[in-house]
Structures are given as structure tokens and as C-alpha cells.
Amino acid sequence: MSMINRRSLMTVGSGLLLAGCDKLVQSPGLVSVVQSAEQATYRWQRLIGRDALAKEFTKADLSPDFKVNGTREPREDAYQALAANGFADWKLRIDGLVDRPTDVSLAELRRLPARTQITRHDCVEGWSAIGEWSGPQLGTLLKTVGLKPNARYIVFHCADNYGGEQSKGGAQSSGIYYESIDLVDAFHPQTIVALSMNGGPLSVGHGAPARMRIERQLGYKQAKYVMRIEAVNSFKGLELGRGGYWEDRGYEWYAGI
Ligand SMILES: Nc1nc2c(c(=O)[nH]1)N[C@H]1C(S)=C(S)[C@@H](COP(=O)(O)O)O[C@H]1N2
Ligand SMILES: [Mo]
């Protein structure tokens, strides 16, 4: 287990990011995704607007009532035990295709430089809400652990086994919730591991102790209850192989807004 500190952050810094970007452009996998034109926004964001920011709002725009959706509280014993202790024993595992697999405590995450952003969350079910999110940038964490050259996607493994809801046309097949993004979104400035919402600690409903904010994509990409962040080369062997719980059940992998 190694601690994250600012020194390692600065030393591994920007070189890796550039190397990662070159690799993305050359990668046949990315080219085939682009050619299949899954969505025009994906092409635009990858080829032209890779750093374009999602719109940010002000405190006056905050939604008085931000809906809790999907899992409201993981029922799993492991999660319940961590929650009972205020997540003092929780550790975020960062591993896979990284140089230094690392377990990071909540206290360590809280000591990292944080980004705060007020953004609109859009769920495919047709509702939106504006909230303020704060936490370290995912890029900071990835630079610290060091991505291996063959890493192409970042996977978020969650604590909850999501069984779906009858009200949405019948129970979905159950499975551990997970999500994934490419390296452009992983190093995007607004991609953060959110530890707080609207100025307070993240509630269990909204994903305590840590949930992703990936602001240029739809609600189902915003993984709650993140336990493990894994760098991978492909989604093969991960559940049904399409890169996410909902993707495995027919949703698009790239959910650009
Ligand atoms: N672990 C986990 N993450 C999840 C979900 C879930 O059920 N489990 N639901 C997703 C969906 S569809 C939406 S719209 C948002 C809801 O986030 P909220 O509860 O903070 O509104 O979380 C996303 N992330
Ligand atoms: Mo959603």
C-alpha cells in the first residue's frame, strides 16, 4: 500500500498524459469506435473538443430536491459494515494496468486537492437536477499510480448488486453495478471522485462515500458506491463485456450529452 502525495503527483505528471493521448489517437480500438459513429458527440469530443467543459452553474441554480435514483442503499454486508463505521475502514482500491496498485483511505482522498463544480445531471429516464460536487480529479489519482502503456479504459466497480425495478418494465437481471470510461474522459478536468455534494458529505443515497462525476455523460455513467478503480485494456471478461451494468442491458457505452 502506498500513500498518495503531491511529490509523486508532480513527478509523474504531464508526460504520462501526453503519452496517453498519442496512444489514444493511434489506437485501432478507438478508431473503430469512431468509425462506427456510436454518437456524433463522441467524435466531436474526441477529435476536437477533448477538453471542452460541461456547463457549470451557480449556487442559485442548485435543485432544491436532487432525486436519488437506482440503488438507494447497497444491501451487501460488506458495504453495511463499512457504513456502520462511518467509512473509516473503507479504502478505494486502484489497480489493474497500473504501475503501483494502491489502496487509498477516505482521509487520504480528502487531503488531495479537490475540484468543486455545479453541474446538471441528466438521467435517461427524463429528469435532470443541478448539484454541487467536490472531490479529487480522477486524473490526479491515475497519474499517481501510473498507468501502464496498454491501459485504455478505466472501470469503476461499485458496492451494489442492482436488481432493477419493477416500475421500469420489469426487474432487470441482477448484477454488480459497474461503469467505464476512456482515457480522454478519465483525464478530463471535470471527471472527479466526488466525496461531497452541495457542501456536505455524500449521503448514502447519492453514493457514499465516493461516487464518480463524469460531467459530459448521462446519469448512468455516474457510478455511486465506488469501491475499486481498475485500468484495463478491454471489457472482455467483465460481466457481459459491454463496459457497464446498463450497457450490458442495452444502453450505449458512450452516453454523451
Ligand atoms: N452504483 C450505482 N451507481 C449508479 C446507479 C446505481 O444504481 N448504482 N444508478 C445510476 C443512475 S441511472 C443514475 S440517474 C444516477 C443517480 O444518481 P443519484 O442517486 O445521485 O441521483 O446514478 C447512477 N449510478
Ligand atoms: Mo439514470
Image: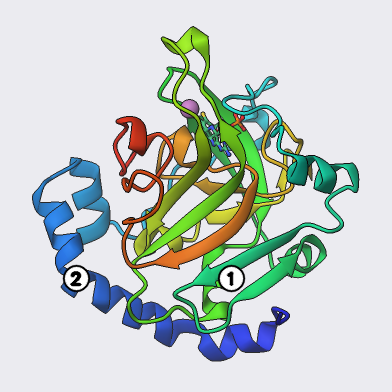
Q: Three-letter amino acid code at disc 1?
A: Leu
Q: Which mark is residue 141?
A: 1
Q: Is mark 2 within 8 Å of ligand 1?
A: no
Mark 2 Cα-neighbour bin, 10 Å: few <14, some 14–19, many ≥20: few
175 to 12, vertically: above or below? above
* Residue 84 left/right relative to 240: right
Closer to us: 43 or 207: 207
Closer to us: 9 or 226: 226
Q: Which element type, helix, strand or loop, lies under badge 2?
A: loop
| Residue depicted at 25% across the width and 70% down the height | 24
Which x, y percent locates residue 127? 49, 19
- Residue 207 image-quadrant placement: top right
Which quarter of the rendered picture does the N terminus lie within?
Answer: bottom right
Residue lying at the far left in this picture: please name it. 35
| Residue depicted at 27% across the width and 53% down the height | 45
Closer to us: 31 or 235: 235
Q: CA distance from mark 2 to mark 1?
A: 23 Å
212 to 247, vertically: above or below? below
Asked if disc 2 and disc 1 are in contact, CB closer than 8 Å, the reply is no
Q: Which element type, helix, strand or loop, lies under badge 1?
A: helix
Which x, y percent locates residue 25? 20, 70
* Residue 200 left/right relative to 63: right
* Residue 36 left/right relative to 44: left
Which x, y percent locates residue 222? 52, 41
Find disc 2 in the rendering and name its residue.
27
